[in-house]
Image (cartoon, grey):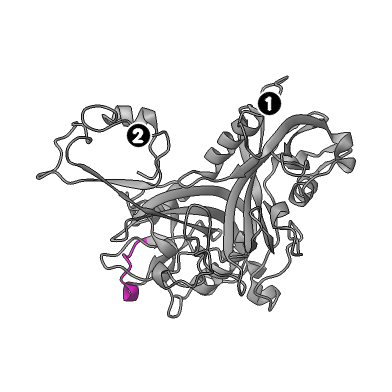
Amino acid sequence: SAERRPEVDRAEGGGEGNFPAPEPFCAHFVFRFTPAGGYPSGTARYGPGVSAEPMSMLRRVSAYAVLRTPDGRTALVRGSERLGLDPLWSLPGGEVQHGEHPDDAVVRETRAQTGVAVQVAGLRAATADVIPLPGRNTMLHTVRFLYDVHAVGGVDWSRQLRSEPDGTSGLARAVPADELPGTALLDFVADALGVPGTGTAPGPEGATWPASSGVFNLGDTDGTGDDPAGPADLAGADSGPTGDPVGEPGHPRKQRVASYAVVVDGDRILLTRLAGDGRWTLPGGGVDFGEQPEQALHREMYEETGLALTGVRLLGVDSEHVTGQAPDGRTEDFHAVRVIFTGQVTAGALPAVQEVGGSTAEAAWVPLAELGALRLVPFARTRLARAGVTATGASDAIGAPDATDRTDTAVASDAVSRTDAVSRTDGPDHVSEAR
């Protein structure tokens, strides 16, 4: 397992017999059980037959589209048999490239896989899953953003569907609603569409793992978010002097996924103060390997404020791409992907930092009237403005997901990437700010 917790180990027999209880988090080992004939049903799986070996952890970020016709047909794509991918159906979508906003990735991937130019209507979910890579002693943690999209111009997109030329998707189809329960769907797709799944783990580019070890571009390469410049054959990835994959010439790439909360209570907002430079930011932090974005939010909320968040709702996702100085002094090509939530805490609850020696020095309720003069990190100030939280109060928009009008980059612009007004910062000294 990518993550083992004491209560799970007790339930499976851990800590008993010949195998000691593991630490609360043991993400760097995979346990292989190989007794002759397998284990009888219900028996403990720890004991003399256990072996542990080091494993690698990879992470990637991906974005997928829920595109429907007025009569309820849904756009689905199937893995290319030419590449040896199992013919299960997925939503159009795929990897978020380093420095790319997930909003832009879903538009680009949908166009590439279906031939349909789309615009984003809203973000419906942020989820994640962990699967093993066959023959590589590696676990892959994929953070997935699921979007509602519309065809540009309101055209009948079902007549425009085509397969991806020389791509990972072998077929695109508009599937009627009554056929979805009988369609072989990847589990994350079935969950998104509210139909039974196949019990099959998804692989890169929305396909299941083939029997042969194909070569894929996985994007992120480990639990810290490093992103290779080359394909998934990590031995061939270009790397800098520290072993990190190279982004811009000479600069290692780092991609970090984090979850944050906008919590407003009347005329005040919950903020945390950084231990380093004393500026204020939203409560939250990095998504650990194997975590769901919302799970990470609850953990970070407790560590930084001691408060439990209820009524959690997804607001949106922000992206920031900068090259500058990292906390360890290195220059790096840094891509921050931030999942933004909102929710409530118990009335009258007072925040208090729980994590000892962490990045948070203080947690406090701050009057909205003081926001203008407060030293906020740039992304927090921009996000609050986008959520309708200002020094004069909070609008009703804080409870609604982001609405966007992003369109297909091939239609709206010739630029592959652009400076995002949401939270893009330039300059050599702003990587720490982006975190």
What's under tag 2, amino acid-wise? Pro
State left or right for residue 29 relative to residue 286: left
- At horizontal 60% and vertical 30% (from top left) the residue drawn is 302
Image coordinates for residue 332, horizontal then vertical, percent: 63, 63
Image coordinates for residue 2, horizontal then vertical, percent: 38, 45
Res 152 → quadrant? bottom right
- At horizontal 77% and vertical 29% (from top left) the residue drawn is 365
- Which sits earlier in the primary sequence, circle 2 or circle 1? 2
- Magenta stretch encompasses residue 82: yes
Q: Secondary structure at mark 2?
A: loop
Instruction: Report the magenta residues as a range.
Output: 81-88
Q: Which mark is residue 352?
A: 1
What's under tag 1, amino acid-wise? Ala
State left or right for residue 163 relative to residue 252: left
Identify the main secondary structure in magenta: loop
Q: Which mark is residue 8?
A: none
